[in-house]
Image: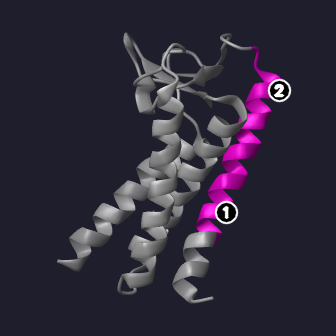
Amino acid sequence: MRPRFFVVYLIAALVIAVDQWTKQWAASTIPPLIGYTVIPGFFDLVNVRNRGAAFGFLNRSDIEWQFWLFFAAAVTAVLAIIAMTRSAKSNPYLFTGFGLIMGGAIGNLIDRIRFRAVIDFLDFHIGGYHWPAFNVADMGICVGAFFVCLAVYKHK
């Protein structure tokens, strides 16, 4: 296996493992729709199921096609990352980003296949502003996108 693939797959595997472990912990520890305050006025742990995309977009139980849309998007993202990893010049920022995104996509895909929804449990708010609940896979995707942007910026 080429070193670039090893890096991408290792990072993806770590994201998937941490994501699935933390979601299992949240689902078995936190009652659904009930939160535990960790830092008052800032951070709660919750157990919510999100059938939609990031930030609850399309989070409705009456839209069945959304499962197939997000399934196809995750599979397409993983295949695109494999293809881009094969053809890209050596760039540690890029391969780190690819691994994080791949791990996040697969982590959420596992939930969609198992539960037809993604388990979200990290819930931040400041005053009247509330950030939608998210999970480790979502963090992987967002931080991975940052690394990909950094790789593009540093390449110029």
Label 1 packing within 10 angstroms: few (<14), some (14-19), many (20+)? some
Q: In the rendered structure, which amino acid carries the disc numbered 2?
A: Ser
**What quarter of the picture does the C terminus occupy?**
bottom left
Magenta stretch contains residue 140: no
Q: CA distance from mark 2 to mark 1?
A: 22 Å
Of the numbered discs 2 and 1, the one sitting upstream in the chain is 1
Residue closest to the eye, 114 or 124: 114
Residue 6 place in picture, x, y as percent: 61, 80
- Please give the count of numbered marks on the rendered protein: 2
Say which residue label 1 marks: 13
Q: In the rendered structure, which amino acid carries the disc numbered 1?
A: Ala
Local SS, label 2: helix
Quarter-wise, where is residue 118 in the image? Answer: top right
Residue closest to the eye, 65 or 144: 65
Magenta stretch contains residue 19: yes
Say which residue label 2 marks: 28
Residue 18 place in picture, x, y as percent: 70, 50
Residue 76 place in picture, x, y as percent: 45, 56
Q: Going 53% across and 59% down the picture, which residue do you hit?
A: 102
**What quarter of the picture does the N terminus occupy?**
bottom right
Label 2 packing within 10 angstroms: few (<14), some (14-19), many (20+)? few
Most prominent secondary structure in the magenta stretch? helix
Please say if 148 is above or below 106.
below
Q: Which residues are magenta?
A: 10-31
**Is residue 45 shown to the viewer in this render?**
no
Please say if 12 is above or below 2.
above
